[in-house]
Image (cartoon, helix red, strand yellow):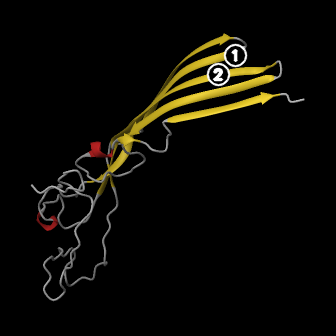
Amino acid sequence: MPRAVSAGGAPFVINEPSYTNPAPRPAIVLPVVFPASVAGPSTISLPSAVRKDLRDPYSMQYNLTIEHQRWETGFRLSYIGTNTRQGEWGYNINQPVPDTRLYVDKPRLFPRYPGITYLSNGAGHQYHSMQLEIERRFARGLAYQFSWTWARDIGDLERGESPENAYDRQRARGVWLDIPTHRVTGNIETVIS
């Protein structure tokens, strides 16, 4: 099985080699979806299929907080977690299996039709965070608040998103980049006279 060096030796590579199909004698001929006697559209698109027993997604939230006060300062350590279950995601049920065969040689469920998106349940995510906060209310001309948050959100697909490879949804799972791992905030108030 040939392996691509640029993809770390993976047999399935995202990019495609450049190719020109000669017009006088084409090497690749696409299937005829409509009979020659009937004029069909230049491209065909099918509506999405939806699982008939599609369920509503749900989420669970949980937290634990420990607080302590000393030296006119409050200390708080919190764990916050959230997860989503049975999220909706769509995948192409007519996608050929990714392997080393040429695209035209791969069997598909419905060979005369293009991609068919099937909407189903199963996507989800896990969010975990730890928060440390130190706060002093205004006393003797000084008030401050500092906090540090460590957060991690791991998920796959959400709101009908589709994976690149319909046969391997796990490849779409990873750390979401829109949640910063570390966040530090702080403010100080004092009286200047």
Which quadrant, please, contains the C terminus? top right
Q: Is residue 150 above or below residue 77?
A: below
Q: Considering only order in the chain, which callout, 2 or 1, is on the residue closer to the N terminus?
A: 1
Q: Is residue 129 above or below residue 159?
A: above
- Residue 58: x %, y % from top left: 44, 34
**In the rendered view, does 114 fall on the left or right side of 29?**
right
- Residue 139: x %, y % from top left: 80, 18
- Residue 46: x %, y % from top left: 32, 64
Say few, some or many: other residues with alpha carbon within 10 Å of mark 1 (under 14 / 14 to 19 / 20 or more): some
Amino acid type at image mark 2? Ile
Q: CA distance from mark 1 to mark 2?
A: 7 Å
Q: Which mark is residue 193?
A: none
Judging depth in this view, the residue of 169 and 88 nearest the camera is: 169
Can you see residue 76? Answer: yes
Q: In the rendered structure, are the residues bearing label 1 and label 2 in contact, judged by CB atoms less than 8 Å apart?
A: yes
Say few, some or many: other residues with alpha carbon within 10 Å of mark 2 (under 14 / 14 to 19 / 20 or more): some
- Residue 141: x %, y % from top left: 83, 22
Q: Secondary structure at mark 2?
A: strand
Q: Which mark is residue 73?
A: 1
Residue that badge 2 annotates: 134
**In the rendered view, does 149 fall on the left or right side of 40?**
right
Quarter of the image where one finds residue 71 = top right
Considering every residue shown, the one lying at the far bottom of the view is: 24
Can you see residue 55? Answer: no
Disc count in the image? Answer: 2
Q: Secondary structure at mark 1?
A: strand
Residue at point 18% right, 76% down? Answer: 32
Judging depth in this view, the residue of 28 and 45 nearest the camera is: 28
Amino acid type at image mark 1? Thr
